[in-house]
Image (cartoon, helix red, strand yellow):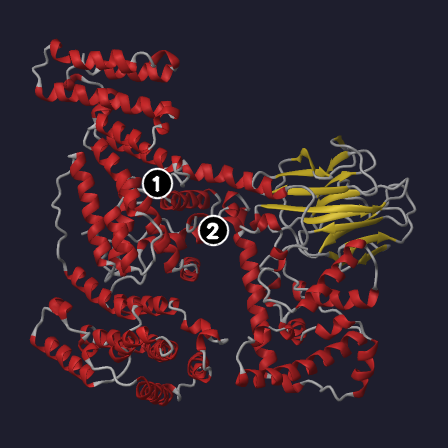
Amino acid sequence: MPSHDSLDRKMDDLKPSKSDINWVIMDYLVSEGYPGAAENFARETNLCSPIEIESIRDRVRVQTAIHAGQIAEAIDLINEMDAEILDTNHVLHFHLLQLQLIEIIRGVLANGQGRSVEFRPAIEFATAQLAPRAPTDPVYQTALERTMALMIFPPEKMVPEFKELLDVKLREKVATKVNRAILESRGERPEAKIRQLVRARAWAEAESRDAKVDLPPTFDIGLDGPEMHNGNDGDVMVL
Amino acid sequence: MTSRDYSFSPPTEPNTATYRRQSYANVTAGINTPTQQESDLNAMSSAGTGEQESVPSTAGHSRHHSRAMDIDDREAQRKNIKDKETRDPYATKTYVDDHLPFFTPSYLRHSRHVQRLHRAYEERLTQAREEALLHPHKEPSLSTSSSNVNLSKMHASHIHRPAVQDVIERLPLATADDQSHPLPSRWSEEDKMNGLDILADGTEIRFVGVTKTSDEAASTRTDHPMPKECGLYYFEVTILSKHKDGLIGIGFSSKKANLNRLPGWENDSWAYHGDDGYSFACTASGKSYGPKFSSNDTIGCGVNFRTGTAFFTKNGVYLGEAFKGIKTDRLFPSVGIKKPGEHLRVNFGRTPFIFDIDRLMAHERQVIMRQIGEFDVSKLHPPDDENTLIHKLVGQYLAHEGYVETAQAFAQDLHDQRQSLAANTQSSSLPKSEDDIHAIKRQKIRKSILDGDIDKALKYASTYYPNTLEEDVNKDVYFRLKCRKFIEMIRRLSEFNTATSSPTALTKSIDSLASNGFESDAQMELDDQLQREASTSAELLPADDVDMDISQELPPKSSFMKETKLLDDVLAYGRKLKHEFGSDPRQHVKKQLDDTLAIIAYPNPSESPLASMLDPQGRVQIAEEINRAILVSLGKPASAALEKMCAQTQVLLDETARKTGNASAFVNVSNDFLRP
C-alpha cells in the first residue's frame, strides 16, 4: 500500500524534538504529583528544574490521604495549604464530604454485623455535614440520597450505579479534582498537557476516518513494540 | 508593519529598517512611485508566486550593482573575521531582503499550514544564499560604467537590494503551486477583467475602463485560492474611492465565475455589495444583510472552512453570518467595481487587520480544544483507560530513552499510589530484565556525552556495543561524535583561558581538563580496565565503579605549560580528525568538518559566529543520536510510543486538513500540546 508508506515517511519527518517530549514528561510528573520521578528526571535530562519539589509533595500528601480514604485528614491538609480552595469551590467540598460519608459506611459494611445501630455515626455525619447543603442543588440531593441508600441495601443486592460509589476509583476521581483545584488556586495549568495530547491523537484519528482519509485499518500507537509481533510471516501475534 | 511579520528575518542594519518603514508608508498612503514599486513588486511577486516578471532595466542595473557590493562586503568581512569576529556573514544587510515576500497573518500564526509554508520559503532562501556564496564571481563587477552612472540616479533603497533576492527570482518554484497551497498574496494580473489597473504590488485595484450595460462590471481574483488547510481565512478591503453611482462587491469566487459581473451575481461566487448592503450567494437576487458601505470604509470577509460559512465585517464590526453551506473547492478572494476612478486596497494580513480576527480565531480554537478535551481515548489501546495509557506511555518513554532512575522512581511512585488505594498489590520491585541492563549501559553513554566527556562515551560505547558505531548506517553518528570531541576540547581550552585570569577556578579547570578529552596515561589505564572487565565478566553492570576520575589525581602543572600542551592536543586532534574524515566526499560531512575545524581560528569561540556549535544543546542531540543507534542495533524501535504518537497525530491532522479544511486545521501538535 504505497499511500500508507508515504504516511510513514511523513511521520518520520514530524518527529517531535526530544526537548519537547521531555517538557511534556516533566509537566506531567509535576502536575500529577510524581515527586521522586520529577527529581530524577531533572537530573537525568540535565534539565535545570525550576520546580519546587516540596510543592509537589504537598499535593501528593493530599492525594495519598484521599486515596487511602482519610478524607478528614485530606480536608485539613487542603485548608492548611489554602483555606479559600474549599470555601470558594462548594462542589468540590461536597464531593469530599460525600466521600467521607462513603468511607464511614464502607467501614461499617466491612467490619460490622449490619445492625442498624452501627450506622449511627454515618447518619449523624450526613445530617450535620451534607443535609444542610442538599437543598441548594438537586445534584447534591440526588448524591446524598444515593449515598444514604448504601446503608439500606446489602452490598450483594446493590445495583451497579450504587455500587460505583463503593468503588475505590471514586477516590481517584475526587483526588484528581482536588489536585486540579489546588493547581488552579496557585495560578497553574490544572491539567498536564499529555492528557490533551493523548485525546488529540484519538480525536484526530476519528476526524480522519470521518473525512475518509486513506488510512490503514488499524493505526497502532506503538506501545507494544515490535517484540510483541512475530515479524517473520507478517502475522500479528500477541504473546 | 509589525515586527512579527518579519520576525524570522535576521537583524537588519538601522538604515534598511528605516527604508522599510518609509517605503511601507508610501504604500499605505497609496502614493504611486512606479520605479521603486515596480522593483519591489518584482521581488514580491516572483518569490511569492512563482510568476516570472519582466525586469525593468533600472532594476536590473541595480541588481548588478548590489551583487558587486556584495562581493566587496564579503571581502571586508573576511578581513574582519581575521581581526575580530563579531559579524555573522548572514546577519549583514547584504543578505537581508527589505521586502521578504513571506508574511504570516497574525490570526494564522498557530496554523500548521502557514508554518509549513514559511519553512519551505526559508529553505528556498537558504538554498539561494548558498548559491550566491558559491558563485559570487559570475556576476558583473562594479567597474561596469553603466552601473556607476545608474547608481547615482537611483534611489538609495536599491543599494540594499540583495543578491539573494535575485537568486530567488530565478529559482524554480516547484513547490509553489499544486502541493503547497500558498496564501493569496495579491490580485492577479491575469485573472482580472479588462479595465482594471492593478497597483501597489498587487494590493490595489482601480477602474480605468468603461462599462456599457448596467450589470457589467470588472472583477478580479487573487493569485492563489484561500487554502482550506488554514481552517479560517480572512482579508480586508478598504474603499479608497467610490463613484457616487458606483457598485462595489466584496467576496470570493471559484474560477468558474465570470469576471465581467460583480462577485455574488455569478455562479460559484459570494459577495457583500456596498450600494444596498445586500449579500449575494451565486444569484442576482440578494438578501438584506448589513449596512451600505462607501469611501473610507473597510470591509472584512472571512470564510470558515470547518463550518462552511462566511461572514463580513465593516470597520472592525462583525456583521454576522452571511452564507452557509459553502462546499466549493479552490475559492479565491474576489472584488468587483464598475465606475471610473473607483479604487480599492486589500490587506491579506501583511499588516494588522481592523477587525479583531485574532480573537475570533482564538475562540474557534477554544471550541475545538474543548471538543478534544472531552474525547474518549479508550479505543487507542484497549482495554487501557486514559490514566493507565498515560502511565504506560510515560514509563515506556523513560525506559526507551534510558532514563533508568526516573523510570524506577516513576514505577515506585505509581506503586505507592496503588498501595494507598489498596486496590492493586503488584510487586514493587521492577523486574531486572535484559532491557534494564541495556538501559543502564545506554544511560552511562548518555551521561558521559551530556557531561561533555566524549572519550568516556566512546569507550563505554566500544566496550558495551563494540559493533554498533562501526556499522555503516552509524557512520555519521560516529563522525559527529568525533567532531563533538573537538568542540569539547575547544570549549575547555577557552574555559581554561578564561580561568587563568581567576586563580581559584584554575585548579578545577586543570583537573577537568586532565580528565577529559586527552589521551593520558590514566586514560590508557582506563582503556585496559574496561577491556579487562569486558573480557572477564559477562555481567557488565557493576562497571558502575569503573573509575573514570583516576586522572584527576594528576598533579596540576603550571598553567602556561598546560595551555601550550592543551593547544598542541587540540591541534593534534584536529589533524587526526581531518585525516580520518577529510577524504569523505559527502557534502554534509565536508561542511561539518570544515565548520568544526574553523572554530579554532577564533580566540574567543563563544563570541564567534560559530558560537552555536559550542552550545551544550549539541551534546543532547548527539546523545540522542547514539541512543537511537544503539536501540536500533538492539532491534528496538527508534522512537518511543509517545514520540510516535505525536507524529501520528500531526500526520492525521495534516491529511484531514488538506482534504476537508475541518477542525483539524485549527490544531497544531507542537504549539498546542508540547509547550505551556
Q: Residues within 10 Å of mark 1 (few under 14, many from 20)?
A: many
Marked residue chain, label 1: B
Which residue carries the number 2 mark?
B671
Residue B328, compared with residue B163, is above or below; it is above
Who is closer to the viewer here, B4 or B650? B4
The number of discs equals: 2
Provide residue B363's location: percent of width, then percent of height.
55, 38
Please name the amino acid that badge 1 sits on.
Val
Please name the amino acid that badge 2 sits on.
Asn
Secondary structure, mark 1, is loop
Who is closer to the viewer here, B176 or A82? A82
Query: Can you see residue A137?
Result: yes
Which residue carries the number 1 mark?
B377
Q: Which residue is situated farthest in the front direction here?
A: B503
Which numbered disc, 2 or 1, marks the residue that appears first in the sequence?
1
Q: Residue at x 32, y 12 (%)?
A: A132
Provide residue A224's location: percent of width, then percent of height.
25, 53
Circles 2 and 1 on the same subunit: yes
Give the mark toward the camera: 2 or 1: 2
Marked residue chain, label 2: B
Q: Residue at x 89, y 41 (%)?
A: B214
Q: In the rendered view, does B459 fall on the left or right side of B136?
A: left
Query: Can you see residue B98?
Result: no
Provide residue B402's location: percent of width, then percent of height.
25, 61
Q: Which residue is situated farthest in the top direction here?
A: A117
Q: In the rendered view, does A35 fall on the left or right side of B217?
A: left
Provide residue A218's location: percent of width, then percent of height.
35, 49
Who is closer to the viewer here, B399 or B178? B399
Q: Calculate the distance from the C-alpha at mark 2 to the C-alpha at mark 1.
A: 21 Å
The part of the image, by quadrant, that contains residue B61 is bottom right
The image's mark for residue B215 is none
